[in-house]
Image: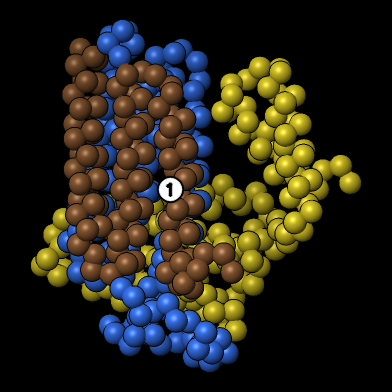
Chain colours: A brown, B yellow, C blue
Amino acid sequence: MSAIILFSAVSLAQLMLAAAMAIASVRMFRGPRAQDRIIGLDTLYINAMLLLVTFGIGTGRVIYFEAALVMGMLGFVATVALAKFLMRGEVIE
Amino acid sequence: MMLPYPLLTLSLVLMWLLLNGFTPGHLVLGILVAVFASWAMASLRPDKPRLGKWYLLPKLFRIVLYDIVKSNIAVALIILKAGRRSHNPGFLTVELDIENHTAIAVLAVVLTSTPGSAWLEYDSNDKTVLLHILDLGNEAEWHDTIKNRYEKLLMEIFA
Amino acid sequence: MMQAAADMPVWAAIAVAFFLLVGSGLALIGAIGFLRLPTFYERIHAPTLGTSWGIGGVMLASMIFFTVSSGRLVFHEILIGIFVTVTTPITFMLLARAALHRDRAEGNGNVPDKQNKSQIAKGVSDESESWN
């Protein structure tokens, strides 16, 4: 019983997160301006991180948690660097 | 001085134990890493935040958690019936009384992580902040929320 | 999964499923809003759905699942939650300021023109606005 509940919930959640990633990448390609594309990238990696955590629940393995943590940290640094570049034209002044 | 930032050191040890699991060996290693990291932090000489009535922090946490749940529902409803233009977005300028940098940072994190309001920029010359609100129904009400609900509490916490 | 999931009591499975669906549903609604809302400053609000309770729901589900299935308290997921809660406002603030700066420099949109003092003090040192 609980296996069925968990399996269907995890599958549904994975579908929804994959759809969210697809929508975020649509906005990333459509723009219209650079700041929209950067927020699209931000949404994309956050949803990918959530997808990894649901993979962890689905397989019952802890290793996905660490992948998600690394993804969150690298994504944050990337977005901040891009935003800084947008404002100043260079990353390190 | 041995420990320039006791709170930072403590939270680094906790983070180390959460990531590696609790064993006596990791406790010793985590304490070593945290002490060296706080010494490195001390050589950067950041401003030290002064806590006033720190026991009000759980109250702030509870208020913020409740507001985030409430505005999550509100923003989700706005998005689901978007296109019919049921909301009126707008900019809002608020004068702040707090000057403590940590308190301003906490206020910015609270307002931005609450869906429906975003912190755009703070001007330290005339101490005003520019916000963007997704559904600016009643301007005075938003003003009142920020001034009385968050700012008063933050001023007491960061005395 | 099957081994761990089959041993799990039904109430825990329902709790995990509930939080997982709430979290991923909010993330999806945030992404939809991000696509549908018309202006940039409105769009900036939509992804915060995913970064507040979207993350919170999925992390709670993961905590309950691993705590119940391994029989000991597992809450290291809270680190991701804290980390994302602290960092998302920083990215959004930086991006919003960059957008304001670009919109003011190009004079498009109805953006409030407030910081004239600091704008003059900074001078014309920015030549990054020309590319899109």
Residue C65: where, in percent of width, then height? 37, 22
- Residue A47 versus residue C102 in the image, above or below: above
- Quadrant including the N terminus of chain A: top left
Q: Mark 1 falls within which chain?
A: A
- Residue C59 versus residue B92 in the image, above or below: above
Residue B69 visible, this orientation: no
Which residue appears at 20% of the width and 50% of the height?
Answer: A23
Residue C128 horizontal side relative to residue C49, left or right: right
Seen as rendered, the residue at the extreme right is B1
Residue A67, by quadrant, is top left
Name the residue nearer the viewer: A41 or B69: A41
Name the residue nearer the viewer: B105 or B67: B105
Q: Secondary structure at mark 1?
A: helix
Total residue callouts: 1
Residue A85: where, in percent of width, then height? 46, 67
Residue C121, by quadrant, is bottom right
Residue B66 visible, this orientation: yes
Residue type indicated by callout 1? Gly
- Quadrant including the C terminus of chain A: bottom right
Residue B122 horizontal side relative to residue A50, left or right: right
Which residue appears at 48% of the width and 59% of the height?
Answer: A81
Name the residue nearer the viewer: B59 or A92: A92
Residue B8, by quadrant, is top right
Which residue appears at 29% of the width and 22% of the height?
Answer: A58
Crowdedness near tag 1: few (<14), some (14–19) or many (≥20) residues, C-alpha within 10 Å:
some
Q: Which residue is mark 1?
A: A75
Which residue appears at 79% of the width and 53% of the height?
Answer: B43
Residue C71: where, in percent of width, then height? 46, 12
Residue C44 horizontal side relative to residue A74, left or right: left
Residue A30: where, in percent of width, then height? 20, 62
